Amino acid sequence: MEANLLYTISNGETFGIMIATYFYLTGLSAGSFILSTLAYGFGIERYKPLGKVGIILATLLLVLAPLFLLFHVGKPLRSWELFVYLNPSSPITWGSYLLTLYPINCIIYGFFMFRGNARLTRIFGFIGIPLAICVHGYTGFILSFGKARILWNSPIMPLLFLVSAMVSGIALMILVCVIKDRFFSREKKINKELVLDLAKMLGWVIVFDIFLVICDVSVLFVSHREAFEVGNLLLTGKFSFWFVGVETLLGKIIPLFIVFYPRTRNIPALVFACILVVLGIYAMRCNVVIGGEFIPLL
Amino acid sequence: MKKESKSTVRYGMVIDLRRCIGCHSCSVACKNENEVPLGVWRSWVKQIERGTYPRVRKYFLPILCNNCERPICTTVCPVIATYKREDGIVYIDPHRCIGCRYCMAACPYGVRYINPTKGVAQKCEFCLHLVEKGIQPACVNACPNNARIFGNLKDPESEVSKLLALNPFQVVKPEMNTEPRVFYIGGLDITSIEKVGEGIE
């Protein structure tokens, strides 16, 4: 039966762009760290040039990320309470410890790497991998535990966040490698082999990411009414430009094409693809966080 | 396993939708009593209309914090600033809340807000300061038709218990498994009111 809404109240947005940016930065950091450990943890020689850049990026991004949390909370001076009053069922409580341990581990790992101590670098690299996965996985859990919103309350969210973290991390790493080699190295020569190798990795991770997004969004359309509304919001509604256009087409399909099509496998095209990917993942974070809470609850 | 509280008091509210006339007295009284800032509300009356002229009718759904038995807000609060008291009221400690808004994001009823001047989360607490002195909550006192009835759910002689024993009742979003303690009796199926408006801007 036809019914119209006459009056209701919405008490405003909850997470918004600050939290989306925070998720994005932790994702970039975790992605860079895992790439860095490929050489110094797992000992894959051809990724050696990534180690030092990766750890510097991971540390810097993770020092930056919690600032957005402090801007977001209403009482930043009370943040010490997070370490004293613990609620084991709250992902933010897990996160407050992860966000402390992970950068400390990053700094120790980086310190030994620059000192050339291979054994200790390896040990702290292996400690860092689960930490990096947790630090970004827990942000997925923050949204998964947000019971009110059907787009968030999904068990796939932590995995989706981890995979998109890898996508953005690899893309950022390619960009940084190209810039570093082109402008700051002695030979001013880009390590083409490494960049192509990373691009291939990027391509396959994007394929996996697309698969996860298809899983996530397709189920929305066969679930209950609220899920259907969110699905429509993303595919045809207000967020369709950002979801279909920016996140999927510009951020995933076009870069995938550039990476795998032989004629476009050259440095300028790959740099372009990586810029698209890095922006596309930011759009993804915003779509999930802001799109998820867009539809009023009551 | 659910831990059963030993307390003999469990506050709850029954809202008789047949008596609600949509006058918003409860919303105003609540704002007044609890000093709720501009732009945010602890309790409000959602209104929808159904049908076409001349067969048209308005329906009302007073909304407030359900003070759930299994609240998700207490599960996700990182500093245990919000917790369920012995008497069942879900309370927010204003001196501990850090304003992270996670409870707002998790609450399926959207009844929490951030106080813009204090920076902490707030919501309906069944006018705890009045109830502790034996006075009814402000919205219950203000309702001209006694549509809101407040009392102890564990006392079989209380008015809320009697109403719930004698009437079919509903809660908002039972599928969320939060076990709300605000019950609606009378009126039509409240899901048909609650769902209207999803997907609007």
Image (cartoon, rainbow, N blue to C red):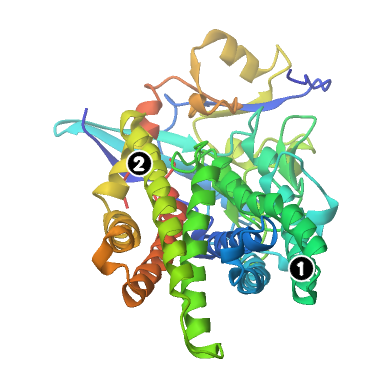
Mark 2 or 1, closer to the camera: 2
Q: Residue at x 45, y 56 (%)?
A: A201
Q: Residues within 10 Å of mark 1 (few under 14, many from 20)?
A: few
- Report if residue A9 is visible in the image: no
Q: Are marks 2 and 1 in contact (CB under 8 Å)?
A: no
- B74 in relation to A93, above or below: above
Let me know if marks 2 and 1 both belong to one chain: yes
The x, y position of residue A253, in whole percent, is 29, 56
Residue A122 placement: quadrant: bottom right
Q: Chain of mark 1?
A: A
- The residue at the far top in this view is B166
Mark before the other along the chain sequence, 2 or 1: 1
- Of the residues shown, which amino acid type is indicated by label 2? Ile
For residue A77, which numbered disc appears in the image?
1
Residues A131 and B94: in front is A131
Return the residue nearer the eye: A135 or A202.
A202
* Callout 2: SS: helix
Residue sitting at x 46%, y 80%? A190
Q: Is residue B60 visible?
A: yes
Which mark, by number, is residue A12? none
Q: Nearer the viewer, residue B196 or A192?
A: A192
Q: Position of residue A219 (x, y in %)?
A: 36, 33
Residue annotated with mark 2: A214
Residue found 66% across the figure and 27% down from its top: B69
- Side of A53 where A171 appears, left or right: left
Asked which secondary structure carries label 1, the reply is helix
Location of the C terminus of chain A by quadrant is top left
Q: Amino acid at mark 1?
A: Leu
Looking at the rendering, in which quadrant would you find the N terminus of chain A? top left
Q: Is residue B78 above or below residue B152?
A: below
Q: Left of A283 or right of it: where is A177?
A: right
